[in-house]
Image (spheres, rainbow, N blue to C red):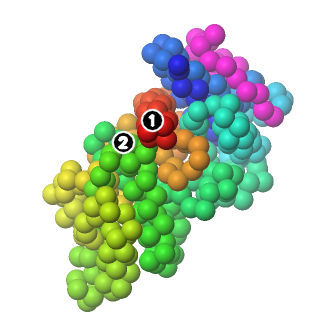
Amino acid sequence: MRTRILITIGDINGIGPEIILKSLGREEIAKKYDITVVTPVSVFEYYYRLLHLKPVKGMFKIVTIGNDRIKINPGKITGESGYVSGLAIKTAVELCRRNEFDAIVTAPISKKALNLGGYNYTGHTEMLTDLCKSKDSVMVMVSKKIIMGFASTHPALKDAPKLINREMLASKLGICYKTLRNDFGIPKPHIGVLSLNPHAGENGQIGREEIDIIKPSMVNIRKLHKKLKLEGPFPSDAYFAFKIYNRFDMTFAMYHDQGFIPFKMIAGLKGVNFTAGLPVVRTSPDHGTAYDIAGRNMADEASLVEAIKTADKIFKSRKKSSSS
């Protein structure tokens, strides 16, 4: 039985519609998965004409939202596009939670447009966590070469260290442990934890978070999850320079750029964003709306294709885990 995957349209003024149409134009994608797109119908009609793409009839279904008089302005941030992107996410979550679909793949959104559209969230992860009524979640970046979990998602850099505490790390690393076991089929996960400060704090000379928060948290988490192996905290420069990440099933970063910069350099165009800790499976491409090339037929669909494949794998792994 084919996995029933919902794809949300994302920001209609970004590259989301283009990469969706290009992905579903690949016969191996459209035939292997049961695909449904959450979108106003007029969005696809508009981009088929604009990009001179051949319509992919009968290869996917549509859940219609909004109205067909919506204004599409490629490359522009608008409240209307933000409203549609938020409505698509909300609709997809509701359908998945009713077990009408198996997984959600979200096309890129603009946080500013989302807020202008009436949805007060800092991003996909935060919105999905709230809509799913989950206590916590973890942003996880996935590729064949490296899996990266994050303590925090999108706080300002000056605020990120304030969020790091023992309770937070216990929750996030606990979710990472469960997702590696249930969603990726790794029975005894091995996680490399990065430090917050340069040189892992230099024994407290540069900062004490490693001594006072991170190391004690790791000790407690090991006691709680006997099959979890944790190592670190590692200074991130040496960790990536010497490819220490190859020893681990997952690398756990303390803040956004610490993990995203090396991840994107390692994963290339095939990185996937996965939200761990939710009752529904959700993946997305690892890039944004790319307003600068929207509507110009220049977008590469590789990351969305990988997001579809990853959603299918995670759903099947989770299903197998729950039945065993």
How busy is the neighbourhood of tag 2: few (under 14 within 10 Å), some, or many (20 plus)?
some
Residue drawn 22% across the image and 83% down it: 202
Q: Residue 31: where, in percent of width, then height? A: 51, 14
Give residue 320's mark. Answer: 1
Residue drawn 51% across the image and 49% down it: 275
Q: Is residue 170 visible?
A: yes
Q: Is residue 259 magenta?
A: no
Question: Would residue 117 be found to the left or right of residue 321 on screen?
Answer: right
Q: Earlier in the sequence, mark 2 or mark 1?
A: 2
Amino acid of disc 1: Lys
Q: Is residue 258 visible?
A: no
Q: How far apart are labels 2 and 1 at the CA level?
A: 9 Å
Residue drawn 48% across the image and 13% down it: 27
Question: Would residue 289 be found to the left or right of residue 231 on screen?
Answer: right
Please report the bounds of the magenta region as a residue range.
Answer: 45-66
Tag 1 secondary structure: helix
Choose top left, top right, bottom left or bottom right for residue 106.
top right
Q: Residue 304: where, in percent of width, then height? A: 48, 33
Q: Is residue 271 above or below residue 3?
A: below
Q: Is residue 39 above or below residue 226?
A: above
- Residue receiving disc 2: 185
